[in-house]
Image (cartoon, rainbow, N blue to C red):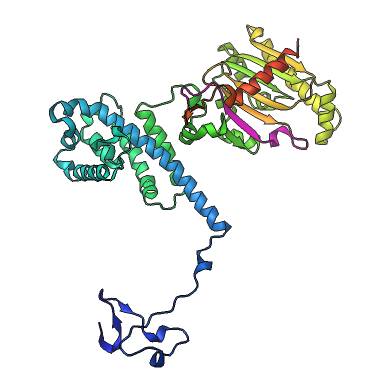
Amino acid sequence: MGAEGGAQVSSGGLELPSGDAVPGGDSATDTPPGAVSLVQPVEIGAELDWGADAWAEVRTRARRAGRAYIWLNLVEQRLRAVVAAVLRPIYEPVHDDDWVVAAAGPAGQEWVQRAVAVREVSRRKGYLLDPADDNVLSFLTLPQLRELLVQHWPCFEPYLDDRREVELALDELEVARNVVSRNRALSVTVLAQAERASARLLDILGSGTGTPSADRLPIDAVEDLVGDRYADVVGVHPDRVRLQRQLPVEDLFGNARRLDAVGIGLNLLVQNYSGRRLVRLAEAGCRARLLFLNPASSAVRRRERELGLKKGEMSRSVEMNILHMRRVRARLRDPGAFEIHVFDETPRFTAYLVNGDGSDGLAVVQSYLRKARGIEAPVLVLRGGGRGHDVVRDGQDLSRDGDNGLFGTYREEFESVWADSRPVS
């Protein structure tokens, strides 16, 4: 190798560094004639270390990409099932196992042949762990599945109402799909867009939850797959203000058939849900049981001292809340549908159990902290009644019912306190 001016050139045509680039070296004396001198290696171990900020950034990226991947995976599998259900009966009787190739037609010949080749490679290398995946359809990507759907839209039209809405949702997913497939940084905005589009598309494709609670607090895809790690806790908020941003009281109580609440003053219900709406709720068939702390009990006075309130301040507040609920009850045709009790025990938590006897149960629970008001205490959101299916891991049933959930624990605690309470006339 050689070049004009004495530069050293590799076989690939790239110029190699000369001996002059060696730190502290003298090319005239250290480098033999005709030899290529390279920069000496330097210590790089320190540059490979990651600090706390770098690890935090990587974990943030991984969490976002993981959430997006789960949504995209659900959409792709659902769309694959829909394509198979609609197109297989049309093409398989004539083309047998090559029905996907026939459905792709000349316009899709290139990408369907690529899928066939990938399938053959996977067969040879033993990548097909499930025999159910040994078909061309399993190797089509989301854009290719979309091509089949658009190309054969008259076949899908009887099942899907709006082609434009389907395509818009798939367009929104394409950005996240490209980012995730190339392991690039995913912004919060794009992730939120992908989650909304995925949920909308899954609903269009007919895989909704089918439970009324989905209207108030939709089941998240990550919760649906790995939620057994957290029993039936589906939300944790540092205070009640942030809870109400995600779950307004109208969404929490608006479609209640049954409402059981226990606490000191039940401010989330009494002060945020108007008496008129409570009357309409009761007249629509909702049955409510409200448990207030007795405003004349010593527990109220202890709580006042904990919070640094003036003597009688909390008692008057609880009395006003009870009086307001009594006025609501007086306006009902069936006062028995709206029961009000008081208890004298030390209050340990406040809980609102909505539809606790059904599959769409939802609960908001707060523990009482010594120096924090209820509005400032952390909030747990629980989903009760299971989710219509069981989670099984390593042969162990981890369904949301029974001992694995907190909803039942608080429901039992409510019933225990209710049994020892006294009615308010």
Task: Let me know if residue 348 appears in the view.
Answer: yes
Check residue 376 for magenta coloring.
yes
Q: Residue 160 location, x and y as percent? A: 30, 27
Q: Residue 14 location, x and y as percent? A: 29, 76
* Farthest residue, direction right: 311
Could you say which quadrant of the image residue 303 lies in? top right
Q: Main secondary structure of the magenta part?
A: loop
Give the quarter of the figure containing the N terminus: bottom left
Task: Let me know if residue 309 appears in the view.
Answer: no
Q: Which residues are magenta?
A: 369-390
Check residue 410 for magenta coloring.
no
In this rendering, the count of numbered labels is 0
* Farthest residue, direction bottom: 29
Could you say which quadrant of the image residue 325 lies in? top right
| Vertical comparison of 298 with 148: above or below | above
Q: Residue 390 or 320: which is nearer the viewer?
A: 390
Q: Residue 150 location, x and y as percent? A: 24, 35
Give the quarter of the figure containing the C terminus: top right
Q: Residue 325 or 113: which is nearer the viewer?
A: 113
| Vertical comparison of 164 with 273: above or below | below
Q: Residue, x 58% and y 28% (percent of image)?
A: 382
Q: Residue 194 location, x and y as percent? A: 41, 41
| Vertical comparison of 356 with 181: above or below | above
Horizontal placement of 230 versus 317: left or right?
left
Horizontal placement of 7 versus 93: left or right?
right
Q: Residue 401 or 83: which is nearer the viewer?
A: 401
Q: Residue, x 45% and y 43% (percent of image)?
A: 66
Horizontal placement of 185 versus 275: left or right?
left
